[in-house]
Image: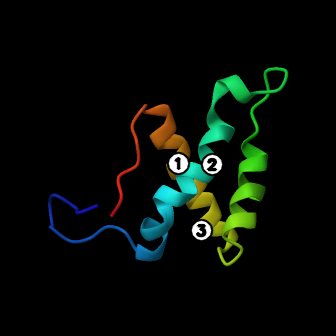
Amino acid sequence: MTDPASGSERRSNPQLRKIFVEAYDVLEPFFNPDNDWGGQHHEHLAYLALHERFPELTPIESFALVTAAKRVFHSSAAPVAP
């Protein structure tokens, strides 16, 4: 994402952007309300699924991907490939 004021790139980790669409596909089922269990969401399982698919990610990178995927899901948008 480019900062409109300065025109500079805001993302500090282009590797995360590169894998975001694939990570979103892994994470999407965990944010779907149809998949909850007794009214509880499965967000904690999203971290496990992400770690299984991308074991090289640090905990902070995993958190960033889960947070971004949740934001995209709740906005009813679809992720866009870089």
| Residue 14 in the image: above or below residue 45 | below
Which residue in the structure is indicated by mark 3? 61
Residue 8 badge: none
Identify the mark nearer the N-term, 1 or 3.
Answer: 3
Q: Residue at x 36, y 59 (%)?
A: 81
Quarter location, residue 2: bottom left
Spatial separation of the CA atoms under disc 3 and disc 2: 14 Å
Please say if the residues under marks 3 and 2 sit with CB atoms less than 8 Å apart: no
Label 2 amino acid?
A: Leu
Residue 50 coordinates in the image, percent (x, y): 68, 60
Q: Name the quarter where the C terminus is drawn.
A: bottom left
How many angstroms separate mark 1 from mark 3 (CA)? 12 Å
Would residue 6 appear left or right of 34 to someone viewing this image?
left
Query: Closer to us: mark 1 or mark 3?
Result: 1
Give the tally of numbered discs.
3
Tell me the quadrant of the picture where the N terminus can be found.
Answer: bottom left
Circle 2 SS class: helix
Residue 4: name its quadrant: bottom left
Q: Name the residue under label 2.
A: 27
